[in-house]
Image (cartoon, rainbow, N blue to C red):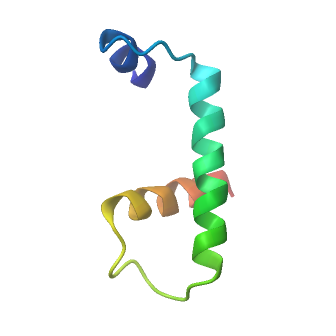
Amino acid sequence: MIEVALNSQGIPRGAHSIRVRLRLLAKTHRFKMSTRDMGQLGLSERQQLLRKYCKKLE
């Protein structure tokens, strides 16, 4: 679905590269969040989505 959306906008991306990019974002997010101790209050929508994605990876 994401791959089709990117291709329709002229951005060629394979499913593998999307997964790799998501894992890199998740790793970076985990590192940033490890230095903080807060709930979801105050997190941006992107940070909340990354937090949910990280929980699914565990």
Residue 57 in the image: x percent, y percent? 65, 52
Direction from residue 49 to residue 51 in the image, left or right: right
| Residue plotted at (45% across, 18% down) | 3
Residue positioned 36% across, 73% down in the render: 43
Total labels drawn: 0
Q: Quadrant of the N terminus?
A: top left
- Residue 36, percent across and down? 56, 85
Res 49 → quadrant: bottom left
| Residue 12 falls left or right of residue 19 | left
Measured along the vertical axis of the image, is residue 56 above or below residue 5?
Answer: below
Q: Quadrant of residue 55?
A: bottom right
- Relative to 43, is 17 above or below? above
Residue 23 x, y percent position in the rendering: 65, 45
The relative height of residue 9 versus residue 38 in the rendered view (above or below) is above
Q: Position of residue 5 (x, y in %)?
A: 34, 19
Tell me the quarter of the image containing the C terminus: bottom right
Residue at 67% x, 56% y is: 27
Query: Furthest-bottom residue in view?
Result: 37
Tell me: 4 left or right of 56. left
Q: Residue furthest front?
A: 10
